Image (cartoon, rainbow, N blue to C red):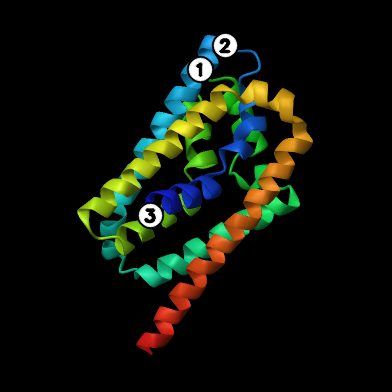
Amino acid sequence: MELFIYVFAALFSVINPLGAIPIFVGLTQDDSKQERSRISLWTAVNVFIILMISYFAGKYVLAFFGISIDSLRIAGGIIIVSSGFSLLTGNFSKKKGVNKKVQNDAMHRNDIALTPLAMPMLAGPGSISLLIAFYQEHSEISQKVICCLAVLLVAFSIFLILKSAHYLSRILGASGIVAISRIIGFIVIAIGIQYITSAAINIFKVL
C-alpha cells in the first residue's frame, strides 16, 4: 500500500493534470459536453498507454543507448525540478511544450486527445523518466503490478479532472488553480532533488 501511494503521489504531482485545465478549457470551449467527455476519456487512455510503454520498454531503450539508471535519475530529476520551479513561478503552461502554433493547430483538428493533451502536456519527459526509474528500482512482479495499478489510477484521475475541467475552472478560478499548482510544484521539486541526490550518492559509492 505504501508503494502504491508513493508511486501515485509522485506520478500525479509530476504530471499535474490540474495545470492542464486552462489549456483543456481553451481547446474545448466550443465543444459539447459529450464531446468533452470523449476527449477526456481518450486523453486518459492515451496517457495510460504512453506511460505503460515507457514503463516496460524504457529499460531496453537505456540499454540500447548505454545510459545508466543513475544518469537517467539525474536527467529526470533536473527536468522534474525545472517543472516544479515553473509551477511555483506560474509559468508552467509555457513549459508544457504547447506553443501558440501548436495550440492554433489543435483548434482546427477534430481530435486533440493524443496531441497536444496526452503528449506532451501530460505524459512528458519527467513522468516517463520517473517510471523508467521505478521499473529499475522495483524488480518484483508484485511491485510492478502495484506500479501499473498506480498508473491506472493516475489515468483515471486525469479523466475525472479533465471531464470536470470547465466546472473546476469556474469554481476554483485562475487564482485557485495557480495556488494548487504551486503547492504541487513544491512537492515536485522535492521529488526531483531526491532523485538527483540518490543518483549522486550511488555514483560516489562506485567511485
Determine the residue positioned at 49% across, 49% down.
9
Q: Is residue 95 left or right of residue 66?
A: right
**Which percent across, then down, holds residue 23?**
64, 31
Q: Tell me the quarter of the picture where residue 206 sits.
A: bottom left
- Residue 111 seen in render: no
**Which percent across, then down, holds residue 51?**
38, 44
Task: Provide the residue designation for mark 3.
Answer: 3
Determine the residue positioned at 34% across, 68% down.
67
Q: Nearer the viewer, residue 106 or 136?
A: 136
Q: Earlier in the sequence, mark 3 or mark 1?
A: 3
Task: Provide the residue designation for mark 2.
Answer: 33
Looking at the rendered structure, the kind of residue marked 2 is Lys
Question: In whole angstroms, how far apart are the C-alphas of marks 2 and 1?
Answer: 6 Å
Given contact means CB atoms under 8 Å apart, are the residues at marks 2 and 1 in contact?
A: yes
The outermost residue toward the right is 175
Looking at the rendered structure, the kind of residue marked 3 is Leu
Crowd class of label 2 (few under 14; some 14 to 19; many from 20; radius 10 Å) = few
Task: Provide the residue designation for mark 1.
Answer: 37
Q: Nearer the viewer, residue 63 or 7?
A: 7
